[in-house]
């Protein structure tokens, strides 16, 4: 039996292929623009490049929209594969079924981050009369395009190599307490989580984009461990159930989608001002406000599970 | 210094295809502040294409259009829209008014995107309606107007943002003689207001008018 018998996977890969094809055509135009662009020229070729520039922007914006939807679809597909993969109880088992799964997931998140940065630079570019960030944004897109190509190869390698006869490890095995970094305890991680969160709010208040950039990267990793090893247990209401994927299921009202999306979107707004500044030297401080608001929502959601559990039961897990 | 300078302007439709058509072939033109220019020519000679390029509705295939020293053909879409909103008043052959709205609402439509105060808006509305001689129909629905009145409403709309350049594409094509003569009266008022007016027409009523500064004949995408 092949995983390709799942309709959702065939549709997923087909859309990914169409997006890849579309962006391959795009990339040819991008290379032409990078090579021949001369904004001061008023000849036929330059005008045609300017028209194509709008076309390329539209295709990339479309790609970003589709990629966001496809990412959610990808995570959902992992859950759909659970009944087919022996030993898997949730997406943890499916994603770890071979060596390509986790790297593919990281690739997807990284591509979305880069596309988000591209979108910010594109907005700044369109706001300048001379389209002065045009080359920079297309160099960035070229990197993204290479990553999209690798991502597609990884997707094929991952889905083809999911074992359907060999049992895989699932969350009860993969996420044991000993997996925490630097010999930290769960409580240490939670203290660090709240400390960094407050530090992010403070650095955003004082509009320190470089400090916020570092704190947000730290917060991303600390949040991953905090959610998996601490807050998650309150979602499941089981002290030994530690998993970053199980709460994506219907049993937990899909709250995992809300938790992870607020974390990733919030972090994006926290790190992008510094990245954008390093590329185009413009400080977009408004994004830090979004960072504070969304990470507050994330922290409140996580904390509320602990609080409600305590109110209901009078004890912590 | 000229307000509008056009250099070696070409516009080719369907370039590289079998149906390729050269609408403009190497147009050169310069217009000073307050000048009225009439571009004459038969249908298909390229007059409307030239006006749409000056209004930055579309981009040329090659060449430059400098307005106040800025090449408006190079403007990104968002800036082209801003330029059009601030500097250009366009009078269309078929008026392009919004049926179902009143004269007042049609005239005010270009001001939707401005951040002017209500007093300034009302003042500008009054001036535009007065110049176009349509103030008595302010609250009337467009559907209830005659052809001449629709034309005057379109003129008021073109004037409401106080543009320095007014482009009129076959402004009398849908009017009878009496209303066409009224349009010439309004054209005289534009001259007094020192606005640049470019009229594209094949109507002989525009021949030998004393207040017109420049006549240009167009044929096959070129000035002759």
Image (spheres, helix red, strand yellow):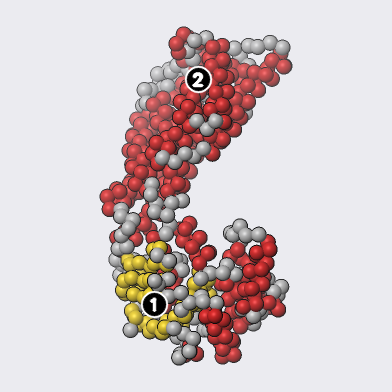
**Residue A105 showing in the rendered view:** yes
Residue A96: x percent and y percent? 42, 21
Contact (CB < 8 A) between labels 1 and 2?
Answer: no
Q: Give the image quarter of residue A306.
A: top right
Chain where mark 2 sits = A
Residue B4: x percent and y percent? 41, 71
Q: Give the image quarter of residue B68.
A: bottom left
Residue A234 placement, left or right of B81: right
Using the image, tell me which numbered label, if any, was put on residue B74. none
- Which residue is at a point 61% across and 83% down the rendered structure image? B148
- Which residue is at a point 62% across and 78% down the rendered structure image? B131
Q: Which residue is mark 1?
A: B46
Residue A194: x percent and y percent? 57, 19
* Residue placed most toward the observer, A301 or A210: A210
Q: Tag 2: Cα neighbours inside 10 Å, few (<14), some, or many (≥20)?
A: many
Check chain identity for marks 1 and 2: say if they share one.
Answer: no
- Which residue is at a point 34% across and 81% down the rendered structure image? B223
- Rendered position, A81 above or below A191: below
Q: Which residue is mark 2?
A: A222
């Amino acid at each position: 039996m092949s995983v390709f018998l799942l309709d959702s996977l065939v549709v997923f890969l087909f859309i990914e292929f169409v997006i890849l094809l579309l962006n391959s055509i795009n990339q040819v135009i991008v290379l032409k623009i990078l090579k021949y662009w001369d904004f001061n020229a008023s000849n036929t070729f330059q005008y045609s490049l300017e028209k194509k520039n709008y076309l390329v922007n539209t295709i990339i914006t479309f790609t970003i929209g589709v990629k966001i939807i496809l990412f959610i679809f990808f995570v959902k597909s992992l859950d759909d594969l659970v009944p087919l993969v022996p030993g898997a109880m949730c997406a943890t088992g499916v994603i770890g079924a071979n060596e390509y799964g986790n790297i593919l997931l990281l690739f997807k998140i990284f591509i979305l981050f880069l596309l988000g940065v591209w979108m910010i630079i594109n907005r700044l570019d369109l706001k300048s009369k001379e389209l002065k960030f045009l080359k920079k944004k297309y160099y960035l897109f070229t990197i993204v395009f290479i990553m999209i190509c690798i991502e597609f190869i990884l997707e094929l390698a991952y889905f083809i190599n999911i074992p359907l006869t060999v049992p895989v490890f699932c969350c009860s095995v993969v996420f044991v307490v000993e997996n925490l970094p630097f010999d930290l305890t769960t409580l240490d991680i939670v203290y660090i989580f709240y400390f960094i969160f407050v530090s992010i709010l403070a650095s955003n208040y004082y509009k320190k984009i470089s400090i916020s950039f570092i704190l947000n990267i730290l917060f991303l990793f600390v949040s991953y461990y905090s959610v998996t090893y601490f807050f998650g247990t309150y979602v499941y209401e089981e002290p030994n159930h530690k998993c970053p994927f199980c709460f994506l299921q219907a049993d937990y009202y899909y709250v995992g989608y809300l938790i992870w999306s607020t974390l990733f979107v919030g972090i994006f707004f926290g790190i992008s001002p510094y990245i954008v500044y390093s590329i185009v030297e413009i400080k977009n401080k408004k994004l830090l406000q979004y960072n504070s608001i969304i990470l507050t929502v994330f922290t409140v959601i996580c904390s509320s599970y602990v609080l409600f559990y305590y109110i209901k039961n009078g004890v912590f897990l | 210094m000229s307000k509008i300078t056009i250099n070696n302007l070409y516009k080719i439709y369907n370039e590289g295809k079998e149906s390729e058509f050269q609408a403009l072939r190497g147009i050169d033109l310069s217009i000073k502040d307050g000048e009225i220019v009439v571009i004459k020519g038969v249908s298909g000679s390229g007059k409307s294409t030239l006006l749409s390029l000056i209004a930055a509705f579309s981009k040329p295939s090659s060449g430059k259009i400098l307005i106040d020293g800025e090449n408006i053909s190079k403007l990104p879409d968002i800036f082209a829209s801003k330029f059009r909103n601030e500097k250009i008043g366009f009078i269309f052959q078929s008026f392009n008014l919004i049926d179902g709205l009143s004269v007042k609402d049609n005239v005010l439509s270009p001001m939707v995107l401005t951040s002017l105060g209500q007093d300034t808006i009302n003042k500008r509305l009054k001036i535009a309606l007065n110049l176009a001689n349509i103030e008595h129909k302010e609250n009337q629905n467009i559907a209830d107007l005659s052809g001449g009145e629709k034309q005057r409403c379109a003129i008021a709309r073109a004037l409401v943002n106080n543009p320095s350049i007014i482009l009129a594409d076959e402004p009398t094509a849908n009017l009878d003689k009496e209303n066409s003569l009224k349009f010439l009266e309004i054209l005289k008022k534009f001259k007094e207001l020192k606005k640049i007016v470019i009229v594209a027409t094949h109507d002989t009523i525009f021949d030998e008018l004393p207040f017109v500064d420049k006549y240009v004949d167009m044929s096959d995408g070129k000035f002759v």
